[in-house]
Image (cartoon, rainbow, N blue to C red):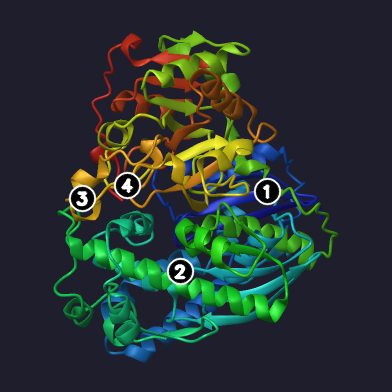
Amino acid sequence: MKNILGISAFYHDSAACIVRDGEIIAAAQEERFSRKKHDERFPFHAVRYCIHEAGIGPDELDAVAFYDKPITKFIRILETYFSVAPKGLRSFMMAMPIWMREKLWIPLEIEKALEQCGIKSPGENLFFPEHHESHAASAFYPSPFPSAAILTVDGVGEWATSTLGRGKGNELEILHDLHFPHSIGLLYSAFTYFTGFRVNSGEYKLMGLAPYGQPTYVKTIYDHLIDVRDDGSFKMNMDYFGYLDGLVMTNDKFADLFGGPARKAESDLTSREMDIARSIQVVTEEIILKMAHHLHNITGEKNLCMAGGVALNCVANGRLLREGPFENVWIQPAAGDAGGALGAAELVWYKVLGNKREVDGVHDRMKGAYLGPDFDREVEAFLQDRGYLYRKLEGEAWATEIAKVMAEENVVGLCQGRMEFGPRALGGRSIIGDARSPKMQSVMNLKIKYRESFRPFAPSCLAETVSDYFELDRESPYMLLVAQVKEDRCIGLEDADKLPIRDRINQVRSDIPAITHVDYSARVQTVRRETNRKYYDLIKAFKDLTGYGVIINTSFNVRGEPIVCTPEDAYRCFMRTEMDYLVLGDCLLAKAEQPEWKDKGNWREDYVLD
């Protein structure tokens, strides 16, 4: 076998991936093509892209791996409903049709997708690893480590919600697991729901809100909701939760515990929500740390690999790196369900087929997560065909001209090179700006992203100078670690925590205020030239011009929209917002020079708010 297609689908963030001879050739989420955020449908578009990118002929696909076991998951759902009957009937009646129509017929869906691509089905070479085994494979196999402990944490797979494992060479073993309904991911999602954000979408908002609050509810959570043991295993008190027998995450008893009903979406945030966010964040971090210590004790490994949706909690990751027992931590950049497609394909290549795994202990095999489509060669034809005005930047001028534009406090949309795989924009599909600007956070949040003003922005910095700006002694290429801004760059603010949230947001807290969160932290991305030459050169040019080798980087989209994929997606988002400039490949577009935008569409109508 040579070419293996990995697929994840039907829950959220469906995706496809092609692995050839162990090398990751292409990977992408369906949402980027369908323009439906967190698209859960079968990834027909992503499959077609991966097949095309890999140049696979009609008879050249050798195997397909689906990221979980649908029958086992179906049994878990049936058992759960039967255990709470007659409660949950409405939820049961809503779930069954899609299972009977789609989720139990995945081999046929795969065959249909391949047929649309002109590819012959690989016949019996169809594999269904377990959900958390796919997560573990996505964490370990692309990592730089010859051996490592593996921690996977999410909402739920078939039955497992967290696993402790170990990888060595091409072998991977799950040592212990925690079963549904006891789940860190579902616990965190319950609080996401209660504070008025969308489940499976707004968890990162809860994390961003946490520094504004105090951990006043930590004891309440431990006393009433969860019993945590020293090894990090735990049991939840299901009397307070509604996801077993209803269509809501929390119930009235939960509301009584926290002083009233759940916050309504889009209503004003109060100190209660801030304190709740801080409290559940603290509890989550403490559980992850306990799991990590136990995992270290039973494996003796110095390296840790992580995946699963909770592994995207970069605040917990930063604390784990600082306080945990492991010397090195590597986190799959597509840690959620999308990454399960990659893990399933890698699992077949290494564990099922027994192929040798070669690593150097330093470099991972994710190619910077730049595994999606590249449209740079098509940009000029696209612009000329539509009459959009641009200036082509060649050679060194590309980086220097964009740096000048940014230094003048302009907001720039950047669409160049291959699209990123995973939820983070890493310089391929990013909105960038000057981190020194005290107004940039509010401008980007309110006029560009159209999102909640409290949400912080991340910095991209040169890998070799990261310690000049942050308390971080290693690289963070996938924006999955939070670190403190260097103390000598910070500005002390007395009684800041007593101010209303709107006033605290706009305070200048350091000499790079646009990326310094209220607790003086930042979600750091380090950039190396070998991984993304043009993005590195841009930051280097900005440093040569301003003395600062750090810029703002946020995803190229508006609220509720998937990250842009094509030049057309990028131009539409550019014209619908108050961005000043757009970079498409080697072409620079100024908003003031563009023809009148006649698209009467409105992003608020096109996208569901997340």
Residue identifier under label 4: 455
Asked if 405 appears above or below 463 in the picture, the reply is: above
Q: Which circle's residue, 2 or 4, is located before the other in the chain?
A: 2
**Residue type, mark 1 in image:** Ile
Marks 4 and 1: CB-CB under 8 Å?
A: no
Residue 107 in which image quadrant: bottom right
Three-letter amino acid code at the position of disc 2: Glu
Q: How crowded is mark 1: few (under 14 residues within 10 Å), some or many (20 or more)?
A: many
* Distance CA(mark 2)–CA(mark 3): 24 Å
Residue 18, numbered circle: 1
Which tag, 4 or 1, sits closer to the chain's start? 1
Q: What residue type is labelled 4?
A: Arg
Under circle 3, the secondary element is helix
Question: Between disc 2 and disc 1, whose residue precedes?
Answer: 1
State the CA–CA distance, disc 2 to disc 4. Answer: 20 Å
Left or right position of 291 against 198: right
How busy is the neighbourhood of tag 4: few (under 14 within 10 Å), some, or many (20 plus)?
some
Q: Answer yes or no: do the residues labelled 3 and 4 have beta carbons within 8 Å?
A: no
Q: Classify residue 292 as left or right of residue 205.
A: right
- Circle nearer the viewer, 3 or 1: 3
**x, y (%) of residue 104?**
51, 70
User: Which residue shows up at 80% across the image and 65% down it?
Assistant: 170
Q: How far apart are marks 2 and 1 (CA)?
A: 34 Å
